[in-house]
Image: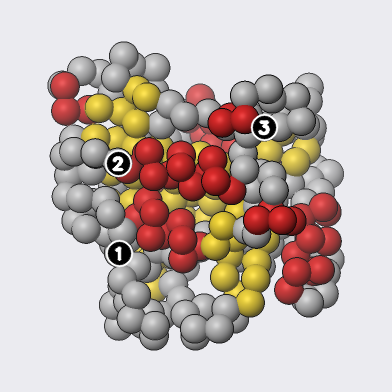
Amino acid sequence: MRDRGAHGQSRTLGCLFCKIVFLSQFAEEEIDPYKKPTKHNMRMAMFWLVQGCQPGDSLVFHFSGHGSQQRNYTGDEVDGYDETLCPLDFETQGMIVDDEINAAIVRPLPHGVKLHAIIDACHSGTVLDLPFLCRMNRSVVLERTVYMGGPSPPSGIWKGTSGGEVISFSGCDDNQTSADTSALSKITSTGAMTYSFIQAIEVGNATTYGNMLNSMRSTIRNTDNLGGGVVTSLLTMLLTGQSLSGGLRQEPQLTANEPFDVYSKPFIL
């Protein structure tokens, strides 16, 4: 989703200047081959999102689907695993790795452009490979994520932007799974993270990034019968050789390309 904010108009998601690429969640029912969430189509959508962006633009990348992990051999990940998104055809074409996502929509972002990523998937905590992760400790700071000393990991690959700003909300930590549940909407099964994100805005808790994150975590924490993503957990076990660990409850995460005070920075898409 692309909001051409430079026109000076009201910057809402329903504005005239929003441009949207939508890949159908009902892939088996989709007739248009370009709207199926295949690896190629997802790559093209990411390329489209940042192509030609200018100062004042506000971009939104939303993914709700399966996420997983695969072994990392460059030393860039503390836990030894890259985070991934699973396209419709991942079994034949492979998954989309965090390094590729970073290179596609983070690294090219120029000065004056803002990108928000909303990722409702398992193992999605650092799926954009952003340098800073918010830890709600006593000081509530954005800590370095997978490497120290700068936005470049041991491989030397730049993980920051080209002057733009990137902030990502994700469904859970890297070692957790994200749930689909009917316990939140009471009507139909929805992604817990997506529901909590929308709920935080609707009830007026989206004042700052810190308040937004706390509201999302509180919504999920206070929900009964919130199961994990069993299918994706089994997928991860098969692909990485890890064992399933029971009892994990998802906790939404906030990452960014640069540090900021989460309780003073207003939340603005």
Q: Which one is closest to the eye, mark 3 or mark 1?
A: 3
Looking at numbered disc 3 in the image, what kind of residue is underneath it?
A: Gln
Q: Say which residue appears at 34% left-offset and 22% top-offset.
A: 18
Decide: few, some or many residues near mark 1? Use Cα within 10 Å; few <14, some 14-19, many ≥20: many
Could you tell me how far apart the alpha carbons at marks 2 and 1 are, in whole angstroms?
17 Å
How many C-alpha atoms fall within 10 Å of the one at disc 3: few (<14), some, or many (≥20)? some
Image-based side of 163 in relation to 148, left or right:
left
What residue is shown with label 1?
A: 160
Q: Are marks 3 and 1 in contact (CB under 8 Å)?
A: no
Relative depth, front residue between 20 and 268:
20
Q: Residue furthest top?
A: 16
Q: Are marks 2 and 1 in contact (CB under 8 Å)?
A: no
Tell me where residue 80 sits by quadrant: bottom right
What is the secondary structure assignment of the residue under circle 2? loop
Q: Earlier in the sequence, mark 3 or mark 1?
A: 3
Q: CA distance from mark 3 to mark 2?
A: 24 Å
Q: Quadrant of the N terminus?
A: top left
Q: Position of residue 251 (x, y in %)?
A: 62, 55
What element does badge 1 sit on?
A: loop
Mark 3 highlights which residue?
25
Say whether residue 119 is left or right of residue 260.
right
- Residue 200 left/right relative to 65: left
Instruction: Give the residue displayed 74% in from the left and 47% down from the top.
Output: 179
| Circle 2: residue type | Gln
Mark 3 near mark 2, Cβ–Cβ under 8 Å? no
From the viewer's side, name the closer residue of 201 and 42: 42
The answer to whether residue 64 is left or right of residue 203 is right
Tell me the quadrant of the picture where the C terminus can be found. top left
Instruction: Identify which residue, 91 or 213, lies in the foreground.
Output: 91
Q: Amino acid at mark 1?
A: Gly
Query: Which secondary structure lies at badge 3?
Result: loop
Q: Which residue is mark 2?
A: 51
